[in-house]
Amino acid sequence: MPAQTVILEPILPMPAKAEELEAAAVEKGPATAAEQAPASESAPQYAVWRQTLVVPGYWVRQTTAGNYYPERWTLEQTAPGAYRWRLLPAEVRSR
């Protein structure tokens, strides 16, 4: 099996920067308590974190008992947008 290139694009929440909040407050001028919204109530910001990964290739050997697959690394999806590396054990699959 040849190596495979995988592109992951998880969406991550981004915290609001303090400088941006202060600059916005200065531009608006003085505000009343009713006009000020806490940072937790403001619209959340998200960013796409693009990752390019290479899953290493491996050789499959044909034997009289079946096909032998060696130990190999793969990407496993644990949740939507979350992945982890997993080491698969060696195995023989009958034909």
Image: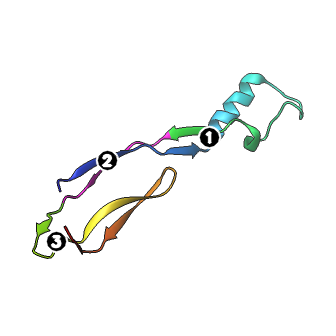
Q: Nearer the viewer, mark 1 or mark 3?
A: 3
Local secondary structure at mark 3: loop
| Disc marking residue 50 | none
Of 47 and 28, which appears nearest the observer? 47
Give whichever of discs 1 and 3 has the lower sequence position.
1
Residue 2 point in image, percent of width and height? 17, 53
61 to the left or right of 39? left
Residue 72 point in image, percent of width and height? 25, 67
Q: Which residue type carries mark 2?
A: Val
Q: Which residue in the structure is indicated by mark 2?
A: 6
Can residue 52 be found in the magenta stretch?
yes
Distance between mark 2 and mark 3 Cα atoms:
29 Å
Q: Which residue in the structure is indicated by mark 3?
A: 66
Give whichever of discs 2 and 1 has the lower sequence position.
2
The magenta segment: 48-57
Distance between mark 2 and mark 1 Cα atoms:
32 Å
Residue at 79% across / 24% down in the picture? 29
Is disc 1 surrounded by few (<14), some (14 to 19) or many (20+) residues within 10 Å? Answer: few
Distance between mark 1 and mark 3 Cα atoms:
58 Å
Q: Nearer the viewer, mark 2 or mark 3?
A: 3
